[in-house]
Structure formats: C-alpha cells, structure tokens
Image (spheres, rainbow, N blue to C red):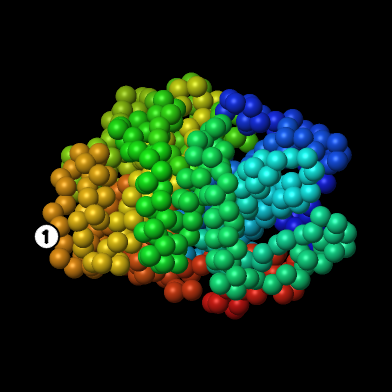
Amino acid sequence: MKLYHITLILTTVLIPLFSSCNDFLEEKVYTEYSPKALLSTQEGIDALLAGAYSRSRIVQYDSRNYTYLFNEFPTDIAFESGGGLERNAAPFINFTWSIDDQLLNSFWEKMYTAISSANSVINVVENIPNMSEQKINSALGEARFIRASSYYFLYNLFGTVPIIEISKDASPDEIEEIGSSTPRATKEQMIKYIVDDLVFASENLPEKEDPIGKATKGAALAVLTKLYMHERDWNNVAQTAKEIIDLNVYTLYGDYVKMFSIEGEDNKEFIYRAPCIAQPGYANNYMAHAFPPNYPIQSNWLNFGAQFRTYTAFYDTFAENDIRRKCFVTHYVDQSGTEVELLRSNGVALNNARSFKYVPDPNAVGEKMGNDIVYIRYTDILLCRAEALNELNGPNAESAQLINQIRNRAGIEAINLSDYPTKEGLRDLILEERGREFFSEGLRREDLIRHHKFISNAIARGKKAQDYQELYPIPLRQLEANHNLKQNPGYSN
C-alpha cells in the first residue's frame, strides 16, 4: 500500500504569493516543474511554500472535523445531531470511536501531506546557490513552522507519531521503505523535534503577518507555548508567553462579538489563523451547521440538516452581563413567524442554543463563508501565562491581572485574588474562564486533558469514557501500511 504522507511531491500545486489575501489563496496548477529552473529564484521558492501552506490549512470540512468533532463534541460545550453528519459525529460525542474511523485517518494523511510538502521546501532551499543567508533562513523558517505546527496537531490527537525525513536524492523505493518502517518517535524525540523547528522559525520569521496567514515570529512562539502547555512545562510556558507579550505586536480586540466577523478580521489579537475566502477549498463552513431549523437566513446562505448545538449547562456558566453571551442565539422567530426557544422549555434544558461566534458572512456563497479560522489568539497566550504562573507560584497578582484583562473585555466583574487563596481554586477558575472564552474554537478537549478532567467530565455527563481515550487511536490504515507503527494503549483489542 502506498503511503500518501511520505511521498515526495514531484508534481506540485504552486500558488504564487502576492500581497493580497485572495491572491495568496488562488491556486495555479502546474503538471511539472524543473527544480533547477523554477526553484532557483525567490518567486519559485515562494510558490513552493504557498503549496505547503495550502496543504497545511485546516479549513472547511477539515476544520469541521478537527475543531468540532475531534476537539469540542467530546466535551461539555457542544454536540451535533441531524443530517448525514450525525453518524460520523456520534462516536466522538459518545466516546465510541473506532480504530478504523475514516475522519481520523483523513486528518492523519492531510497533516503528513503538509509535512512532506514542507520537507520538499527544506530540501530545495538548502541547496540553492547565490541566495542570501537571510532569505534562505526565512524560507526555512516558514517551512519548519508548517512542519512543526502539522506535527503539533497530530501530537494533540494521537500522541507521538513517526518523524519522517527524506533526503533530496532518495529513490522511490527508499521513500517507500521509510514510510513503511519508521516507528513512532519517543516523547523526548517528538518534543525536541517540534521545539527545534519552532525555535528556528521564531528566530528567522518576521513579526508582521503579511499577507494574512503567513507564518510569523509570534505564531511560532504561540505554537511553542501551546506545546509547552500540553506538556505542563510551566517554566517554559511562562517564559515563551512573556516573549510574545514583550513583542508588543498583539493586543486584545475591543469588540469580542465582532472579532470573528469579516469586519473584525483586521485585528491584532489573531496570532495564528487560516485565511478564508468564500470559495471551494478555502472557506469556513461552520455557520451552515449552526443555523437552527427554518432560521431566517439570507438567500445566499445555506442551512444544513446537521445541527451544531450548545449544552444549556454550558451556556449557564456565563454571567448574565457577560458580553460573550451575545454570540449565542437562544430564541428566534422562524421564517413562518413562529417563535422558537432554544434554551429551555418549561424549565427543562433543551441543549439547543446556537453559537454564532463566526458571524455570518454577508457575501457568503452557500455554505462557504470568508471568516478566517483562528487557531491561536493573544487571549490564549495571556491565559497560558496566568495558568503557568499559578502552577509555579500559586495565586499571584500577575495571574489575576491577566485574567482580569479578559474579564474586563467581557464586561464582567474582575476577580479579587483574596477570593482564590489556593492554587487549586485559581486553577479551576482559569479552566472555567478558558471555556467561556474559547467556545467554538476547539480548545476545550486539550484544556480538560491538561487539567485531568476530560474523562471524569465525560463520565459525569453519562458517557462510558475510559482513561486511554485521552488519545485517539492510530488509524488502522496506517497500522496496516507501516509494520513498525504501534497502536496507542487501550485500542489493541
């Protein structure tokens, strides 16, 4: 069986990089290219990099799967029912996923395709004559960022995975052998590999995101911060988050509700994102899943039968004056003039509120909207540092100040440090605050795992969750293709 994730891309999709976001996303397909001719120039390298960016973007249905099915529906925030998606979503909601789940396998292959593309860039760039060291390192920084972030997304789901590196002169047989025999990295190898890539990237990338979606110093440091958070490496979390803060590039956006709209994309809070446009392959299709039945949508929008619903208990965690509550639809008048309640009926929770965090794009084309998909925001970095400082020192003034920046924007009362005299109390508050801040962004699963509450939270909601389900299984197709690839504990039987 051929392994898609380790095949060097000899026939590549090239996307010229221009200053506009739209041009950055427009593909031009070439059937063949001569590396010596095309890739000896800056334009050629930019085109090859654009192909790697394109492969690494978690947008449209990939975003739906990664953000919601894999990372939010197994938690206490939201779930899905209805439409053809229900059969795919139900296993993640109910902790009954299998080792041959095709969505998990598809995501694995997508990330390894991005890694392969990034490796191709690295192999080419390192051997270009007559290019300045600064330009070479900048291109390498982008490629290593793409590679590291792709490995991070895999690590978040599956734990350690094979580290695939292929020399520029490898034969097809050698490539096939590498793919079919490389074992999973050890934890130490995995962490070091990702850290080394991100440190190099942070040292060689610009601070300015130009065009939107291009790797930056801040994005590299942000992914590094999240990796350290995953490992509960509190000293490095605190230090790396401080580096991002000290860049003085990022700030909190003033209007939380508008931030995820098309109008709000021009902000200094988004650190790492996928630029989206309302075209096939580059879109954000979240809202087509969030519109409730018979909702009065515009004629150019689409409403799916698959329905993304928010638990009433989660909605109730917000204070009544919390501005973030405005992102939810809990009542509407449908197209026939009927009033519809989504929160409660006769005091009974309906678990049917809808998150409209990604404000519908007025110029959408059916399901395809142009709202950029955000992976890491500055708010996340502030709360990462607050959590790390609490773990290192217990309740402290800086952690409280960082938390209160977020609460102040939300229009709710600042916390008083005297109300949180213990590390455990402030830790729980931070977890709660992260839930209210990052709903619909796919961070809840990793946050609950880090706080050792993912499985217990699921059990409390009636799920038959097992401890080993903090990780997803290595996809069966990958086990069949690589005889040295070992399954995660708990899934062998």
Q: Residues within 10 Å of mark 1 (few under 14, many from 20)?
A: few
How far across and how far down the image is residue 95, in percent?
47, 65
- Horizontal arrangement in the rendering, residue 186 relative to residue 221 (left or right): right
How far across and how far down the image is residue 66, in percent?
53, 51
Residue 337 visible in the picture:
yes
The residue indicated by pointer 1 is: 418
| Residue 465 occupies quadrant | bottom left
Q: Quadrant of the C terminus?
A: bottom right
**Closer to the camera, 210 or 346?**
210
**Closer to the camera, 365 or 344?**
365
**Closer to the camera, 312 or 19?**
19
> What residue type is disc 1 on?
Ser
Residue 473 visible in the picture:
no
| 288 relative to 474, above or below | above
Q: Quadrant of the N terminus?
A: bottom right
Q: Secondary structure at mark 1?
A: helix
How far across and how far down the image is residue 43, in percent?
73, 32
| 43 relative to 101, above or below | above
| 165 relative to 53, above or below | below
Residue at 30%, 33% (x, y): give it: 254
**Closer to the camera, 282 or 229?**
229
Residue at 62%, 30% (x, y): give it: 24
| Residue 487 occupies quadrant | bottom right
Residue at 67%, 40% (x, y): give it: 135
Residue at 37%, 33% (x, y): give it: 259
